[in-house]
Image (cartoon, rainbow, N blue to C red):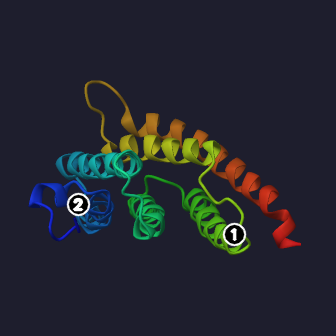
């Protein structure tokens, strides 16, 4: 049965639909962050969190239901990078994250995306490594409290996010070096 022939609720929860929700969340996240305030910060963190959950769900469902597709293989990592990059860029504009940190993170993402394309054309395995998955998890784990920003329930979410961000930066660099070492035969 094709995607078009499935009932509407199955199409809503299809792994490719979940990936597209992540892409669609980006403009909403940006608009919320354009109007800083406690309420919009909470909504931005909520939108980002829900979108981040779809990252786990789409891959899980695609593998479990046998719905792995070429579209998903290409769009899933692109949707992740779009969501995370947009959040980081907006946080730089709000003065919540240092620009150089975002340059390191985005530079790694662009460089490794290109490197993975070269590796794939050479027939190498380009599946995300465990280290890269940890990197993404810590980036998401840093972004949620950084998006919340304001203290809630006596917790300084900005400080919490900053500490998690330092771990994310270390994992970002480490996983980037790991990919370069894995691909060195194709580079030289």
Helix, strand or loop for disc 2: helix
- Write down the quadrant of residue 148 in the picture: top left
* First reached walking from the N terminus: tag 2 or tag 1: 2
User: What crowding class fits label 1: few (fewer than 14 Cα within 10 Å), some (14-19), or many (20 or more)?
Assistant: many
Q: Nearer the viewer, residue 142 or 111?
A: 111
Relative side of 39 to 125, left or right:
left
Residue extending furthest toward the front: 1
Mark yes or no: residue 93 visible: no
Helix, strand or loop for disc 1: helix
**Looking at the figure, which quarter contains the C terminus?**
bottom right
Relative vertical location of residue 96 with respect to residue 69 in this rendering, above or below: above
Please name the residue shown 65% across and 65% down the image: 112
Please name the residue shown 37% across and 32% down the image: 156
Q: Position of residue 88 (x, y in %)?
A: 45, 59
Mark yes or no: residue 128 visible: yes
- Write down the quadrant of residue 176 in the picture: bottom right
Q: Which disc, if any, is residue 13?
A: none
Residue extending furthest toward the right: 188
Please name the residue shown 38% across and 59% down the image: 94
Q: Nearer the viewer, residue 66 or 186?
A: 66
Q: Which disc, if any, is residue 115?
A: 1
Badge 2 is on which residue?
Answer: 32
Q: Position of residue 111 (x, y in %)?
A: 66, 69
Residue extending furthest toward the left: 8
Q: Position of residue 104 (x, y in %)?
A: 63, 60
Q: Position of residue 134 (x, y in %)?
A: 56, 41
**Foreground mark, 2 or 1?**
1
**Looking at the figure, which quarter contains the N terminus?**
bottom left
Relative side of 61 to 133, left or right:
left
User: What crowding class fits label 2: few (fewer than 14 Cα within 10 Å), some (14-19), or many (20 or more)?
Assistant: many
Count all numbered tags in the image, as a single digit.
2
CA separation in Å, label 2 and label 1? 33 Å
């Amino acid at each position: 049965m094709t995607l078009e022939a499935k009932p509407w609720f199955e199409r809503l929860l299809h792994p490719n639909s979940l990936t597209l929700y992540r892409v669609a969340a980006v403009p909403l996240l940006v608009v919320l962050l354009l109007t800083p305030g406690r309420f919009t910060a909470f909504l931005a963190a909520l939108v980002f969190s829900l979108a981040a959950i779809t990252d786990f769900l789409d891959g899980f469902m695609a593998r479990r239901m046998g719905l792995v597709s070429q579209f998903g293989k290409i769009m899933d990592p692109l949707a992740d990078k779009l969501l995370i990059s947009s959040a980081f860029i907006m946080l730089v504009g709000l003065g919540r994250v240092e620009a150089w940190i975002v340059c390191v993170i985005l530079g790694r993402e662009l460089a490794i995306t290109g490197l993975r394309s070269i590796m794939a054309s050479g027939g190498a395995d380009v599946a995300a490594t465990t280290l890269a998955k940890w990197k993404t998890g810590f980036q998401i784990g840093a972004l949620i409290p950084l998006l919340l920003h304001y203290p809630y329930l006596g917790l300084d979410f900005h400080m919490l996010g900053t500490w998690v961000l330092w771990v994310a930066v270390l994992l970002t660099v480490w996983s980037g070096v790991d990919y370069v070492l894995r691909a060195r035969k194709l580079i030289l």
